[in-house]
Amino acid sequence: MPKIAVKKRHVIRKSQITELLDRLTSEIGPSAELFRSDRIERVETDASVELYLVDKKPLLMASGDWAFPTLRGLVEHPLPERRVTVDAGAIKFVANGADAMRPGIVAIAPDIREGRPVQVVEERYGKPLAVGIALLDAADMERQEKGKSVKSIHYVGDDIWNLEI
């Protein structure tokens, strides 16, 4: 399994912290304040997303116009927003990087938008299993009977999860 190579890391300016937190707020609302810190570092890697260290822990990732917590960020600061809940039968697949399929989804938060990041959580304890990109809006996902609903981009045990800094 290829490891993520850390090329550089540097502390970002206050203006960049504000811009990052604004992007995060547009995704998860007021819960973005949980990630506020005076020291946020940007890590340059060969990963497909930008990684940010909040107090030396990889808690945030960003791509394009969105920012979202990593799984470590979601474990450390559980969020009620942007949740897709899967049943017990889907846990092992989603935790190993599979996309979330509609038959296994038991609950969908109404704030989910197509093309935006969501957290995939398990039904019993609400623990995050993956971060993915929603393939449909919440209303369309509710109507969907089968097929992919969330494309997985970060899951338990992947390179971002195992990143040692």
Image (tube, rainbow, N blue to C red):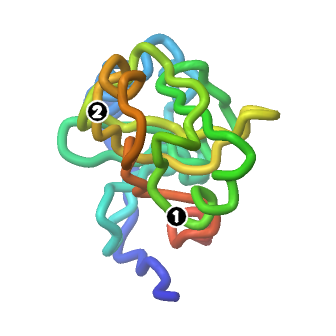
136 or 14, which is in the foreground? 136
Number of callouts in the render?
Answer: 2
Q: Nearer the viewer, mark 1 or mark 2?
A: 2
The reply, left or right, for residue 138 in relation to residue 71 is left
- From this view, report whether residue 90 is shown above or below residue 5: above
Element marked by disc 1: loop
**Rounded to the nearest whole Å, what is the CA distance between mark 1 and mark 2?**
19 Å
Q: Which mark is residue 136?
A: 2
Image: 161 above or below 72:
below
Under tag 2, what secondary structure? loop
Q: Position of residue 129 (x, y in %)?
A: 63, 49
Q: Is residue 75 visible?
A: no
Residue 123: x percent and y percent? 73, 34
Q: Amino acid at mark 2?
A: Leu
Residue at point 39%, 63% (across, down): 9
Q: Quadrant of residue 128?
A: top right
Q: Is residue 109 left or right of residue 45?
A: right
Q: Residues within 10 Å of mark 2 (few under 14, many from 20)?
A: some
The residue at the far right in this view is 125
**Residue 117 appears in the figure:** yes
Q: Which mark is residue 69?
A: none
How packed is label 1: few (under 14 Cα within 10 Å), some, or many (20 or more)? many
Q: Residue furthest left?
A: 64
Q: Nearer the viewer, residue 110 or 146?
A: 146
Mark 1 touches mark 2? (CB < 8 Å): no
Residue 103 position within the rendered picture, expressed as x and y whole percent measured from the top left: 53, 41
Residue type indicated by callout 1 = Gly
Residue position for label 1: 97
- Residue 80: name its quadrant: top right
Q: Residue at x 55, y 41 (%)?
A: 120
Mark 1 or mark 2: whose residue is earlier in sequence: 1
